[in-house]
Amino acid sequence: MKISTKGRYGLRMMIDIAMNQQEGPVSVRDIARRQSLSDKYLEQIITQANRAGLLKSIRGAGGGYQLSRDAKDISVGDVLRAMEGSLSPVACVQELAGETAPCQNSGECATYELWRDIKAAVDAVVDNRSLQDMIDNYTRKNGDREEVAKEENCACSI
Amino acid sequence: MKISTKGRYGLRMMIDIAMNQQEGPVSVRDIARRQSLSDKYLEQIITQANRAGLLKSIRGAGGGYQLSRDAKDISVGDVLRAMEGSLSPVACVQELAGETAPCQNSGECATYELWRDIKAAVDAVVDNRSLQDMIDNYTRKNGDREEVAKEENCACSI
DNA sequence: ATAAATCATACTAAAGTAATAGGAAAGGTT
DNA sequence: AACCTTTCCTATTACTTTAGTATGATTTAT
């Protein structure tokens, strides 16, 4: 039941872009430096977010990435699903074309409702929190401080 | 964010024991037959549940396992945590001696509250559902039918 | 031209998952 | 006492996923 590095790094990356895109597109290199992540690994991650439609890319020198929508219109769920795939705990409760598709056995199954409810509980949290909310939370906690000590291997550090 | 086979099989196993322990201890072999699982793999899983204190074992011929407590006093959370370890989505929000221990960075962290809230949402579901609730749900859906068609590779099938 | 950047794909090492295997120990039955 | 059933214990293996590295092509501003 863990979120992988792709999901965690991907979320840090998206927040980083949201916070730094005011003066033009943000490059992979800059994000990697700020977040202490591998350039090349981050490149894979950003490609995935880009293909999921969460970013706009500008190629060539001076290029980089920007959010495709306003930070308040991109949810944490959008980001995590782009990186992790479905957040469902089991295959029997998968979304199919945006809708939750129960498995064929669900009519007799003892545990179907359990998995469905776990999925719903996770979805409720991640879908009601936008990148803007994450930034607001950050600035509320840190004021306008630019640099923040980063714990090594800390999933939440940004 | 998936529950592994250990968690899924373990839960099916515990429900199976709860439903079949009236006439004495339930053997690994019988559970494996009923649930279409590998004897040897199930043995590992049941050992883990036993060591977590969820079962009582009776050795020797005619032996097997029984729940250590009443089915209504064993939660789905007890079972899943015994099999999966913590249900926290990240290491920063791990329980330590029963309490949720935030990581040292949590005071400045943009995402700490997110992970904490996901964990809390999952915990709320699994801790408020007992094995007895699972059985009740099953019998409500199936009546007293003994045999139920089992979907291959279905996480919820029991 | 050159440098800075995205884009694309292939490869690899390490870890975790899902089993399989073989036997020792305990306890009931004959 | 011999035998069978069952839990208990540990090691091994095959497979998959994760996390990252490597190489190079393409695009574009200066």
Image: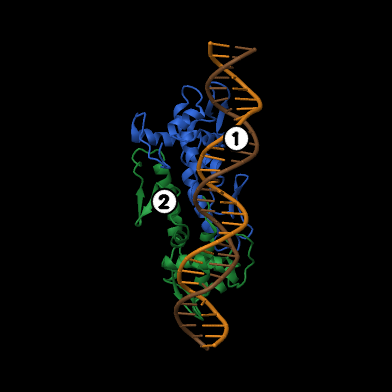
Chain colours: A green, B blue, C orange, D brown
In the image, what residue occupies the spot 52% across and 68% down?
A43
B10 relative to A32, above or below = above
Of residue A66 and residue D27, the one placed in the foreground of this image is: D27
Local crowd at mark 2 within 10 Å, few (<14), some, or many (≥20)?
some
- Depth check: give the residue in front, D25 or B41: D25
Dot 1, crowdedness within 10 Å: few (<14), some or many (≥20)?
few
Residue A135 is at least partly visible in this image? no
Q: CA distance from mark 2 to mark 1?
A: 31 Å
Location of residue B121 with respect to A75 vertically, above or below: above
Mark 2 or mark 1: which is in front?
Answer: 1
Secondary element at tag 2: helix
Q: Chain of mark 1?
A: B
Q: Is residue A19 visible?
A: yes
Is A146 on the left or on the right of A3, as rendered? right
C-beta proximity under 8 Å, tags 2 and 1: no
Residue positioned 64% across, 66% down in the render = A149
Query: In this figure, which residue is indicated by the disc labeled 1?
Result: B51
Under tag 1, what secondary structure? helix
Kindly identify the amino acid type of the residue bearing the numbered disc 1: Arg
Nearer to the camera, C14 or B76: C14
Q: The numbered mark 2 sits on a residue in which chain? A: A
> In the rendered image of this protein, does residue B42 appear above or below residue A124?
above
Find disc 2 in the rendering and name its residue: A120
Q: Residue B23, position in %: x, y?
A: 47, 22
Position in image of residue A97 (x %, y %)? 34, 57
| Residue B31 vertical position relative to residue D17 in the rendered view, above or below | above
Q: Are marks 2 and 1 on the same chain?
A: no
Q: How many numbered discs?
A: 2
